[in-house]
Image (tube, rainbow, N blue to C red):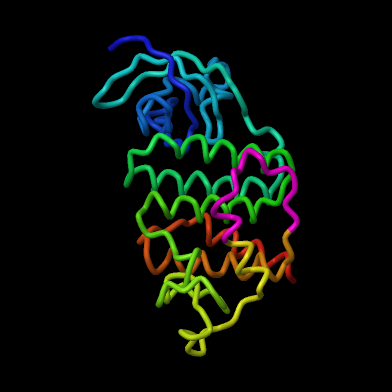
Amino acid sequence: MKIESVEGLILTETNYSESSKILNVLTKEHGLIGIMSKGCRNPKNKLHGVSRKLIYGTFNIYYKEKGLSTLISIDIINSFSKTVMDLEKISYASLILDLTNQVVKQTDSDEILELVIDTLTKIDEGLNPIALTNILELKLLDYLGVAPSIDACSHCGSTKDIVTLASDSGGYICKDCYNNEPLVSEKTIKMIRMYYYVDIKNITKLDVSDQVTNEINNFLDDYYDRYTGLYMKSKNFIRKLNQINKN
């Protein structure tokens, strides 16, 4: 094994033996790798406070191409300190980590880490966490090869008179192809296209109505269920949390 420094984000942590953890880290240099953090569960260990999900930094490791690398130290770039102290923010951040962990196992794209970091940064800065999560969810569908049709009608290809959005049709539906699918607002039709094309790092304001948020979120939830085969436990927690907030 050689000593190497890699930039990455901890997606998952799993306890190992009595005092260690195995960290799944999405890195810029090697994609998703496993790193053993020895003794980190001991409060006196130097790795104790940094061997957790949502730590983004430079990982100094004994790198092993096949098998587990070993952690030496982490130079933190961002610990997302505001997010971990807020229930709503950490709930959506956990969903993002869960989703990312599953997506990167199906694609070797080196663009995903930057997308995820940009999203988590904006959430930490206080922008709308559900809208940001939806933007990332929509963009990640591209990497899974199942992106919805949001430039033209999913049935006929027309770019005119789009009247709704439906997951079972794969995206936009024009008035000529409409067949009693549930209608969404005109704002939702425009906003989901903006979500797809926006550069996350350039977002400075994200005011989205509850109606548009709910319609886009419901579309993406159903779309993921239909076309990706991915299952996120963290999404169930968010649904319960949202139900509590409504009550």
Q: Looking at the image, which residue sits at the far top?
A: 3
Stretch in magenta: 193-207
Q: Position of residue 130 (x, y in %)?
A: 64, 55
Q: Reply yes or no: does residue 120 show up in magenta.
A: no
For the N terminus, the image quarter is top left
Image height check: is 112 above or below 66?
A: below
Q: Residue at x 56, y 69 (%)?
A: 218
The answer to whether 36 appears left or right of 139 in the picture is left
The answer to whether 73 appears left or right of 191 in the picture is left
Of 146 and 123, the residue lying toward us: 146
Q: Residue at x 49, y 22 (%)?
A: 40
The answer to whether 221 appears left or right of 200 in the picture is left
> Exactly how many numbered labels are in the figure?
0
Image quarter of residue 156:
bottom left
Image height check: is 142 above or below 4?
A: below
Q: Reply yes or no: does residue 202 show up in magenta.
A: yes
Image height check: is 220 above or below 46?
A: below
Q: Residue at x 43, y 27 (%)?
A: 28
Of 147 and 131, the residue lying toward us: 147
Image quarter of residue 6:
top left
Q: Position of residue 132 (x, y in %)?
A: 62, 50
For the C terminus, the image quarter is bottom right
Q: Position of residue 83 (x, y in %)?
A: 67, 40
Q: Looking at the image, which residue sits at the far bottom?
A: 180
Q: Position of residue 152 (x, y in %)?
A: 48, 68
